[in-house]
Amino acid sequence: DSGVTQTPKHLITATGQRVTLRCSPRSGDLSVYWYQQSLDQGLQFLIQYYNGEERAKGNILERFSAQQFPDLHSELNLSSLELGDSALYFCASSVDSARETQYFGPGTRLLVL
Amino acid sequence: GQQLNQSPQSMFIQEGEDVSMNCTSSSIFNTWLWYKQEPGEGPVLLIALYKAGELTSNGRLTAQFGITRKDSFLNISASIPSDVGIYFCAGHSGTYKYIFGTGTRLKVLA
């Protein structure tokens, strides 16, 4: 158990819908990262937050957004969902941005029908 | 998106054999991480490397941070069936994000 929690574990929805994925980092970790992993693919970095502020952006679509709250949990919002958005979405956390050993959550499996 | 090159892409080995895999980049990295991922699960951190030339072990696993800072290696000795999974490397260059490798899929034949 990495100490990073993600909910829900599974999510099935329809095209055009909007969903919110939630992540709670390890106790004491200030940085949260979101990744997308499509079937049999590597991990694609989406976005990073550090202590409530956006720190880095990767290949995140405009239909996707995220935020980190004062209690350090983070939410990833996916809107106008398309079939191709079906994937595993992982959250990872680290203590800070300088020495960034990341610990991953169990992921949310999103299926868009 | 940007990714590191990992090789081999997949390998089938006999139980008890040693395994070697590597990760290469065109960019210099300051940190290398190695993860193992099992189906439907999140990646689990195996080894973290922070200095060029560093050699670190975790049980039967040994990883090295290449001298050029553009590569890293992971070795698994005396493989066992539970070593099955996908092994990912990740590099960090001082920007605020990691680049992940394409993964090495390992299958162990008993």
Image (tube, rainbow, N blue to C red):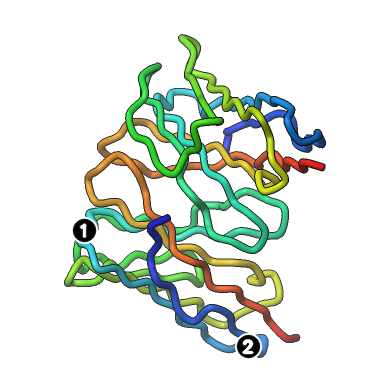
Q: The N terminus of chain A is located in which quarter?
A: top right
Q: Residue at x 22, y 54 (%)?
A: B30
Residue under pointer 1? B51
Whether B40 is drawn above or below B95: the answer is below
Q: Determine the chain carrying the residue at label 1.
A: B
| Badges 1 and 2, same chain | yes
Q: In terms of image quadrants, where is residue A94?
A: top left
Say which element carries label 2. strand
Image position, residue A23 (x, y; %): 59, 27
The residue under the point 64% across, 27% down is A79
Mark 1 closeness class: few <14, some 14–19, many ≥20 residues within 10 Å: some
Q: Nearer the viewer, residue A101 or A6?
A: A6
Figure quadrant of residue B86 = bottom right
Provide the secondary structure element on which disc 1 rests: loop
What percent of the width, then of the height, locates residue B70?
24, 68
* Label 2 sits on residue: B13
Establish if A16 lies above or below B102: above
A113 or B66: nearer the eye? Answer: A113
Q: Farthest residue in the top direction?
A: A70
| Chain of the residue under label 2 | B
Q: Indicate the position of residue B16 as horizontal and vertical percent values.
A: 62, 87
- Quadrant containing the C terminus of chain A in the rendered view: top right
| Alpha carbon distance from label 1 to label 2 | 31 Å
Q: Earlier in the sequence, mark 1 or mark 2?
A: 2
Image coordinates of residue A57 in percent, x first then y, are 37, 36
Residue B40 vertical placement versus B77 (above, below): above
In the shown orientation, is residue B11 left or right of residue B3? right
Give the amino acid type for the residue marked by disc 1 in the picture.
Answer: Lys
Q: Is residue B24 left or right of residue A81?
A: left
Which circle marks residue A6 in the picture? none
Query: Dot 2, how many residues are within 10 Å of its Cα: few (below 14), some (14-19), or many (20+)?
Result: some
Q: Residue at x 50, y 52 (%)?
A: B45
